[in-house]
Structures are given as structure tokens and as C-alpha cells.
Image (cartoon, grey):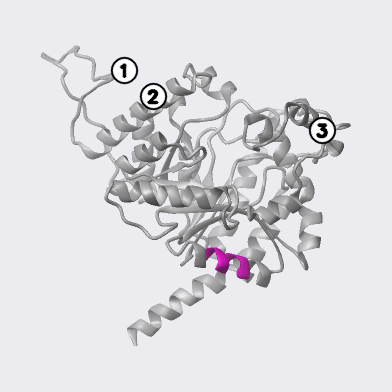
Amino acid sequence: MIDKFGSLFAGHIDLDNIGFAGTAANDRFYSNDELITVFDKTEAICTLMDDLGYDVFWMAEHHFQPEGYECIPNILQLSVHLAHLTKNIKMGCGFNIAPMWHPLRMAEDFATADILTNGRVIFGVGRGYHTREVEAFGAPMLDQDENRDYFEEQVEIMFKSFNEESFSHKGKYYTIPPEVPYRGYTLKEISLVPRPINMPVECWQPIVSAGDRGLNFMAKHGIKGIIGGGAAPGGASENVVRKWQEVQAAHGNDTELGGDLILGISFFIANSPEEAIEQARPFYEENMKMFAPLGFVRGLSDDQLAALADPARAPHADLPTLESAVESGSWLVGTPEQIIEQMEDIEKRWPGLDHVNMGLPVGTPQSVILEQTEAFGKEVMPHFKNRMATAAAAGDN
């Protein structure tokens, strides 16, 4: 049963002239003064979510984006700051992109954040998808096989550093520690200082392609998964959820369907589904302009992708619509009662699912994010939270 609620904020500033007919993604360029407004925006969203009783505020790590789409370069540093402004909500790393870090640096920084926030930061790792970001840091992205090899070795090093008082590692990319003389002896092992105090470290990773290698790697290390892409019966996400359950079972972790997963769902509350679609349409379109050229919208032709970069062509290029996203289950729209009903249907099909991320796409302005976050927190979330409290009280009696 769903009883945990979060939201993922990728870090976009308030954008002007959005939608298919708006400014092309590659033509956006904002000043530093405009780009740093992302921090005030992040604070506003996170503090509201804390007040409303949400469980986790997830943030994404990204770099070098003067276009204004994803502007938070250091999740861990920002999480410590947000912990000072909030009381209960946890901050999730959704995700720290391992290939852009040295694994020991990431492990140290997470451990420091874990200590300073008393366990209110949730660890999350990813391989990355922006060539401009990953390759600029000197790590592989164009070569996907090398990217995965690099990422997997880094994750293994981080888990060693978390779980062992001292350790060594020799792999394809890293020899830790180097065998160098140090204060009269030759270095053979090294210790992470500090190590996290909340153990074992809970770790999450995005599930995108759901390949055998990736899912087995996650199961081996006890990493949990975050997925999006719709919740329609027989749809892409349902296939992923079933495959996830099979792989988990093969590694000795028997879960109900949907267990150890977070489902990401876009939503919009209004007086009717039609009204919600019309209000959210420009945000949906702007999000597609950003992510489709990066491979996140399947089935588009080269001509459609080219049209997305041309405000004159995009509105007439037969691109996917918000109506189709609603039909696929990747968006829930309508009144609070209608959204509750749709979420209850997801629960019935995936009984192990207990955590959802209710989000709004890149392009949504701060005022709308706050309005929708508050509406969901007051008119939808209590339906699920209160029944758990009622069931617990009944058990006590």
C-alpha cells in the first residue's frame, strides 16, 4: 500500500516562452543572476513539502546548463542546507552521477551529509545521460559499455568504503590505495573518514533500459530502483516491475510486485481532466523539448526530433500529446478524487509498491509547483496517510 510520498525536482529555473512554439531549447541562455534563482526555488518547494508532511524531496545533479533546465550541481551540499530549514523531510540524491566524481570523494561527502543531518539524506547514484556533463569531467559517456564498467567499479568501491573499516581495491580503473611509502610503512589499505553512521546505507538508482546486467548489479548490491514512464496495465513500466521482481527473487529477495521500487508519476490537479490537460500542456511540451533529443521519448523519428528544435515546425510535427501521456498512465490528471481513484488502481496491480514520487515536469513555474504540491498534499495525500494511521490505531486496540 502506498504510504510514502516524494517529489523529484530536476532544478529548472522559471523559464520564459515555453511550449512547442516557444523558445528552442538550444536558444535559451540565462545570466548567472537568473540561474542562481534555482536555490530560492528549491528552498520554497522543500520547505512547503516539509510543512505538508511529504517524506522525501529528491533532487538531480547536473552541470553546465545555461539553458536553465537542470541547475543544481551539488545535491549533498544543498541537502545539508535544506536540513537546516526543515524538520522532518528527507533529501534524496536523485541522483549523484558517479562517473563525474572520484568514488572516495562521493563516499566522504555523503558520509559527512549523513552525519550532519542525522540520516536525513538518502544516497542515490546514476550513470548520467548528458555527454556535455560526463565527458567534460573526463569520464566516458559516448561509449556506453565503458560508462557502465566505470560506474559499476565506482559503486563497488563506495560500498567497500562504507562497509569496511579499512579496505583495498584493484580494478580496471582504480587501484586504491596506491602502494606508496607513508610515515615509515607501505600503504596497503585505506579507511574512509568519516564513514556513514546510519548503516547499512540505503541506496537508490534509476531504472531506464531495465537491462539484465543493470538489474542484476542492483540486486547484487541491494540497490533499490526508481522508475517512471507510466502505470497503464501492460505498459512499459509494468513490464519493468515484473522483470525487477524476477531478478530480485533470483538474488534471494522475494518481494510483492512493486516492492523496493519508487514509481514516478506526473500529475496535475484541476476541476476536470480536460482543464488539467490544457493548463499543463505547455509544461509537458517544454519537458519534451528538453529530454526527447537525449533519448527519453521513444519512437520519435529523426524528422520529429529536428522539428522539436524549430518553434515553427514543432506544433505541426505530430509529436506525442499530453492526452497520450494521460492514457499511458504516466500522468494523472483531474480532481483530487479522480487522482485518488487512479492511484488506488495502481496499488491493486502493484501491491508491493509503497512509495511514489508525484512530480511536475521541467518547465513548470515555481508558483504552479507550489500550488500543485499543496493541493496534492492537502487533498490527495491524506487519504493514503490517514488510512495507515487508522489501521495502526485499530491494531493497538
Tell which circle, 3 or 2, labels the residue nearer the N-terminal end: 3
Q: Which residue is tagged 2?
A: 149
Judge whether 123 appears above or below 386 on screen. Answer: above
Answer with the quarter of the image where residue 28 lies.
top right
Q: Which residues are magenta?
A: 340-347
Disc 1 is placed on an element classified as: loop
Q: Residue at x 19, y 13 (%)?
A: 179
Residue 142, can we see it?
A: yes
Q: Residue at x 81, y 55 (%)?
A: 278
Mark 1 and mark 3 in contact? Answer it, CB < 8 Å. no
Tell which circle, 1 or 3, labels the residue nearer the N-terminal end: 3
Residue 65 is left or right of residue 351, and the answer is right
Q: Amino acid at mark 3?
A: Thr
Q: Which residue is tagged 1?
A: 172
* Residue nearest the viewer, comparing 44 with 158: 158
Disc number lying in front (1 or 3): 1
Q: Amino acid at mark 1?
A: Lys
Q: Which residue is tagged 3?
A: 23
